[in-house]
C-alpha cells in the first residue's frame, strides 16, 4: 500500500455531496470517413481489452484516519469504461446536459477513482468522450500530460493504449554515493531555514494586503472582493457549458492593445460576468476579483510537483467601457507581478498560502468568515499546440470540466488547443441559474473589443469556431 500525500488527502477531507472533488474533460472526435455501422461496438470491445495499470488499478483504503492506495482485486472494467448514447435529436445541448449530470455524481471510493464515458448519438459524425478522475489521484497538469500521451500527432498511428493502460514514465535511478545521508540532512536543513527566512516578509506583505495598505493603487488586496451571487453556498448539482473560439481573434486584440493574451482573456471573462450578473439583477457596485493560478517554476527547473502561486486580478466589472475594463485588468496584473518580482519563490508560496486561508475555511466548512479573497477562479492552461489523433480519429476539441467550491460557485478554465481557445464553465446549477448564457456573453466581450480596436468583422475570424459543435444549452 502507498500512503497519499497530505495534499492529496485534503481533496478527500473536503469532499462532500455539495462539493465533489473530481476533475473532468470533454473531448470531441471527428469520426473517420470509413467508420462503419459497427464502429462503436468495435471501439468498446477494443477498449475493454486494456487492463488498468498503476493508480488506475488501485482503490482507497483507510487505516487509522489515513488513506492509502491499494490494489483493487475486484476491478470491473465495465464499471469504469461505459458506452452511452444521447437521446434524440443528439445536439450539443443534450451532450452538455449529459456531462452536467455525470459531473454531479460523487465517485465510489470503494473502486478506483476514475471513469471513461464513450458517448454516441451526436447529429454530426462525431464521438464524444467524457472522463473524470478524482483530484486526489491526479492533478490537472498531470491529466493533460497523460491525455497527450494517449494521442498522436500522426493520423496514421494505430493501437494507442487508453489513459488507464499507460505505464507511468520510469524515474531515473539515483546511485548512492558516500555522503548521501549528509547531503540529505544538509538539504533538509537548508529547506527548513529557507522556509523560516521566507515567513517574515510574506507575513508582512499579507498583513499589508489584509489591511488594504499598498503603494500601488492597482494592486488588489485580500479584502477587496465584494459580496456576490458567485459566492453563495453551493449544492451538488452541476451545469457545464463550453465553446471554442479562434485563437487568432485574441492574438489580434493582444497586438492592437499591446497587452498579453491573458489580459485579453480575463477582460473578456470580466465582460461576460458583468453581463450575466446584470441579467440576474446581481451586479455589485465594486469590481469582481478573480484568482488566477500561475506557475512560479524557474525556467530550468524540471522537477516534478506543483509550484503554483496565485494572482488576484481586478476584472473591472464596475465599468461599461471595454477598453477601460481591459486597462484595469492589465494594471492589476502588472501590479501583482511587480509585487512578486521582489519576493523569492518561497515567499511567494507563503504569501499565497496566507491569501488562500479564507477560501480554505469556505471549502472545509462551507461558511463565510465575513469576506472572500476573490469571487471567481479563472485558469488558463496551455494545451497541445498541434492537432492530435486517437487511432486515426481527429480530436476536434477538448473542454475542461472543473470543480466549483463552497462560496465559489463558478470555475472558468481556458485551454489552448492547436489554433483555438476552449472555454469550459462549470458551475452550481442551483446557485447560478441560466449560467450557459455566459457563452453568448463571451462572444459579446470579444466583439466589443474588436469594435474598439477597429478590427474589421469579416477579417477578424469573428465567427464562433465550432458553432456547430459546441453551443449553449
Image (cartoon, helix red, strand yellow):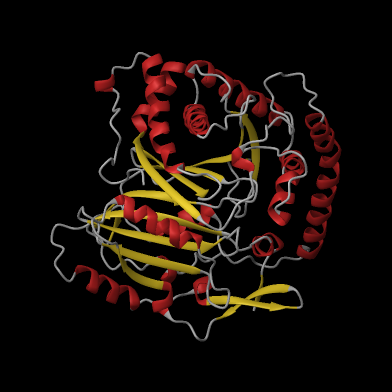
- Residue 176 visible in the current orientation: yes
Q: Nearer the viewer, residue 117 or 185?
A: 117
- Residue at 82 percent across and 60 percent down: it is 185
On the image, the x and y values in percent for residue 286 come to: 65, 25
How many tags in the picture? 0
Residue 295, how many percent across, how many down?
Answer: 60, 41
* Name of the residue lying farthest toward the front: 281
Nearer-the-camera pick, 471 or 170: 471
Where residue 383 sits in the image (x, y, percent)? Answer: 43, 45
Whether 395 is drawn above or below 381: the answer is below
Q: Is residue 51 visible?
A: no
Q: Which residue does the image show at 67% across and 32% down from the upper left?
A: 226
Q: Residue 162: which quarter of the image? A: bottom left
Q: Is residue 251 left or right of residue 375?
A: left
Left or right, 290 with respect to 145, comes to right
In the depicted structure, whether residue 329 falls above or below residue 196:
above
- Say whether residue 304 is left or right of residue 398: right
Compared with 184, 234 (above or below) is above
Q: Nearer the viewer, residue 446 or 64?
A: 446
Amino acid at each position: 500500500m502507498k500512503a497519499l500525500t497530505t495534499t492529496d488527502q485534503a481533496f478527500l477531507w473536503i469532499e462532500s455531496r455539495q462539493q465533489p472533488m473530481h476533475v473532468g474533460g470533454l473531448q470531441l472526435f471527428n469520426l473517420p470517413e470509413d467508420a462503419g455501422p459497427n464502429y462503436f461496438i468495435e471501439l468498446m470491445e477494443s477498449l475493454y481489452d486494456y487492463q488498468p495499470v498503476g493508480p488506475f488499478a488501485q482503490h482507497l483504503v483507510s487505516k487509522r484516519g489515513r488513506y492509502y492506495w491499494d490494489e483493487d482485486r475486484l476491478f470491473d472494467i465495465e464499471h469504469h469504461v461505459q458506452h452511452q448514447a444521447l437521446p434524440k435529436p443528439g445536439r450539443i445541448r443534450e451532450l452538455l446536459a449529459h456531462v452536467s449530470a455525470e459531473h454531479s455524481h460523487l465517485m465510489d471510493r470503494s473502486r478506483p477513482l476514475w471513469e471513461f464515458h464513450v458517448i454516441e448519438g451526436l447529429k454530426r459524425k462525431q464521438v464524444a468522450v467524457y472522463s473524470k478522475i478524482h483530484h486526489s489521484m491526479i492533478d490537472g497538469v498531470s491529466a493533460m500530460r497523460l491525455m497527450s500521451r494517449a494521442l498522436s500527432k500522426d493520423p496514421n498511428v494505430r493501437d494507442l493504449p487508453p489513459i488507464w493502460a499507460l505505464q507511468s514514465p520510469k524515474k531515473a535511478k539515483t546511485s548512492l554515493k558516500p555522503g548521501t545521508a549528509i547531503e540529505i540532512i544538509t538539504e533538509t536543513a537548508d529547506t527548513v531555514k529557507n522556509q523560516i527566512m521566507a515567513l517574515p516578509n510574506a507575513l508582512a506583505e499579507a498583513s499589508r494586503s489584509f489591511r488594504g495598505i499598498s503603494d500601488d493603487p492597482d494592486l488588489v488586496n485580500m479584502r477587496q472582493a465584494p459580496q456576490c451571487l458567485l459566492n453563495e453556498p453551493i449544492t451538488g448539482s452541476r451545469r457545464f457549458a463550453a465553446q471554442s473560439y479562434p485563437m487568432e481573434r485574441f492574438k489580434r486584440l493582444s497586438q492592437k492593445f499591446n497587452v498579453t493574451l491573458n489580459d485579453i482573456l480575463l477582460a473578456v471573462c470580466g465582460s461576460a460576468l458583468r453581463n450575466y450578473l446584470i441579467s440576474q439583477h446581481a451586479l455589485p457596485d465594486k469590481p469582481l476579483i478573480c484568482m488566477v493560478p500561475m506557475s512560479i517554476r524557474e525556467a530550468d527547473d524540471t522537477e516534478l510537483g506543483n509550484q503554483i502561486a496565485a494572482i488576484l486580478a481586478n476584472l473591472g466589472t464596475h465599468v461599461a467601457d471595454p477598453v477601460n475594463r481591459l486597462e484595469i485588468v492589465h494594471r492589476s496584473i502588472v501590479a501583482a507581478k511587480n509585487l512578486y518580482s521582489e519576493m523569492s519563490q518561497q515567499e511567494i508560496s507563503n504569501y499565497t498560502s496566507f491569501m488562500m486561508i479564507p477560501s480554505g475555511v469556505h471549502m472545509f466548512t462551507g461558511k463565510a468568515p465575513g469576506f472572500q479573497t476573490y469571487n471567481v477562479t479563472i485558469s488558463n492552461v496551455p494545451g497541445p499546440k498541434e492537432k492530435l489523433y486517437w487511432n486515426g480519429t481527429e480530436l476536434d476539441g477538448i473542454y475542461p470540466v472543473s470543480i466549483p467550491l463552497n462560496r465559489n460557485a463558478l470555475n472558468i478554465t481556458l485551454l489552448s488547443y492547436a489554433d483555438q481557445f476552449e472555454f469550459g464553465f462549470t458551475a452550481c446549477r442551483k446557485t447560478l441559474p441560466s449560467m450557459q448564457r455566459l457563452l453568448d456573453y463571451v462572444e459579446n466581450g470579444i466583439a466589443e473589443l474588436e469594435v474598439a480596436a477597429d478590427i474589421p468583422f469579416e477579417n477578424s475570424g469573428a465567427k464562433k469556431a465550432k458553432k456547430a459543435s459546441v453551443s449553449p444549452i
